[in-house]
Amino acid sequence: MPFYVNTQKPDSSREIARLLGKCIKRHKRDWTEIVFLCIGSDRVTGDCLGPYVGYRLSQHQLPGIFVYGTLNQPVHAVNLSDITDFISRNHPFALVIAIDASLGDERHLGYVTIGNGSLYPGAAVQKDLPPVGDIYITGIVNIAGILEYLTLQTTRLSTVITLADTIAQGILGNFI
């Protein structure tokens, strides 16, 4: 069951930190490190949420925490399989937290969802990609409906940055 966080509320990053901590504690598998898999493309405004969060997280050196997917080295549909194979080989005991942009209902625009389970990248634009992650975090950047790819291209950058900054602050609230 996903948790929804309204990023327009003043304590939203603290709420994200709390809910992420709750998801991590409820995760039963033994893990020795955490991998943040930040998915998206820096070439589409609505899809750059993951790489921007990855960029923000990569500015901090945190022991036992690894970040894949940044503005300079995005993880997207073309290289997702290679990166997930790399993570499986090099981080076999990692808890993988997948982060991506999503489309949703108008009432949830600007919300973050957090939950245990896998993320289905590319689902909004009908891409058939494998599920990834043990925990997911999504930022609802725009409204789902028709012409999803065009919707992502015309998404406001301010919405994406607000969501990404709040997500990054919430994540860092657990580890700094």
Image (cartoon, helix red, strand yellow):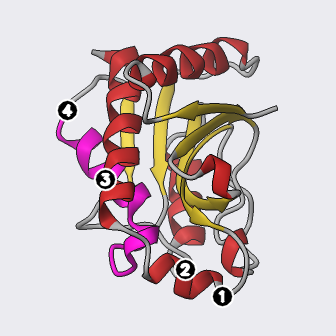
SS class, disc 2: helix
Q: Position of residue 173 (x, y in %)?
A: 35, 17
SS class, disc 4: loop
Where, by quadrant of the figure, is residue 168 drawn?
Answer: top left
Q: Is residue 69 visible?
A: no
Q: Position of residue 27 (x, y in %)?
A: 72, 20
Q: Mark 2 = which residue? A: 151
Q: CA distance from mark 4 to mark 2?
A: 32 Å
Q: In the picture shown, does residue 4 fall above or below 160?
A: above
Q: Which residues are magenta?
A: 41-60
SS class, disc 1: loop
Q: Mark 3 = which residue? A: 161
Q: CA distance from mark 2 to mark 1?
A: 6 Å
Residue depicted at x 53% and y 34%: 6
Residue depicted at x 34% and y 81%: 43
Task: Tell me the amino acid under the disc marked 3.
Answer: Ile
Q: CA distance from mark 1 to mark 3?
A: 22 Å
Q: Residue furthest right?
A: 1
Q: CA distance from mark 4 to mark 3?
A: 18 Å
Magenta stretch: helix, strand or loop mostly: helix
Q: Mark 1 = which residue? A: 147
Q: Earlier in the sequence, mark 2 or mark 3?
A: 2
Q: Earlier in the sequence, mark 4 or mark 2?
A: 4
